[in-house]
Amino acid sequence: MESDEWVCDFAFAVDIMQKLNELNTKLQGKGIFAHELYLEVKAFQWKLGLFAKQLNEQKFIHFPLLKTQSVTQESSDKYSSQLMALQKEFI
């Protein structure tokens, strides 16, 4: 049971790191104005809120690796809380 939880945690970490890497790549693009960077970050904040809500409802459409696991409601709530905390870091 504990190993299943670890695999779910790892799948969540990989999925969210992919999203962070995508944002990082967008922010490093050449010829991008400051207001465009701001909009990218604001859009990502909004997405984090959406992801948290969907995880709370056990909808894993944006988390392809996590979707392949048997995720408990308790784990979904934990991941949702982690995304909300991450969202606050961008404020």
Image (cartoon, rainbow, N blue to C red):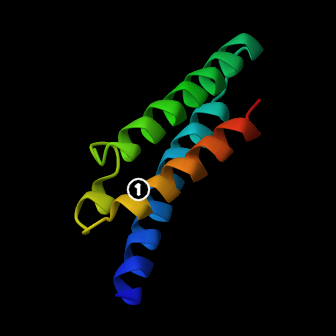
Where does residue 79 sit, x and y in percent of width and height? 49, 55
Where does residue 74 sit, x and y in percent of width and height? 42, 62
Disc 1: CA contacts within 10 A as few (<14), some (14-19) or many (>=20): many
Question: Considering the image in quadrants, where does the N terminus appear?
Answer: bottom left
Q: Is residue 75 visible?
A: yes
Where, by quadrant of the figure, is residue 24 drawn? top right
Judge from the rendering whether residue 84 lies leftward or rightward of residue 59; answer left or right: right
Judge from the rendering whether residue 48 lies leftward or rightward of residue 70; answer left or right: right
Residue at horizontal 31 percent and vertical 61 percent from the top: 65
At mark 1, the secondary structure is: helix
Q: Is residue 31 visible?
A: no
Residue at horizontal 54 percent and vertical 25 percent from the top: 46
The vertical placement of 50 against 55, above or below, is above
Residue at horizontal 60 percent and vertical 29 percent from the top: 45
Residue at horizontal 46 percent and vertical 54 percent from the top: 77
Residue under label 1? 76
Where does residue 80 sit, x and y in percent of width and height? 50, 48
The vertical placement of 38 against 78, above or below, is above
The vertical placement of 74 against 39, above or below, is below
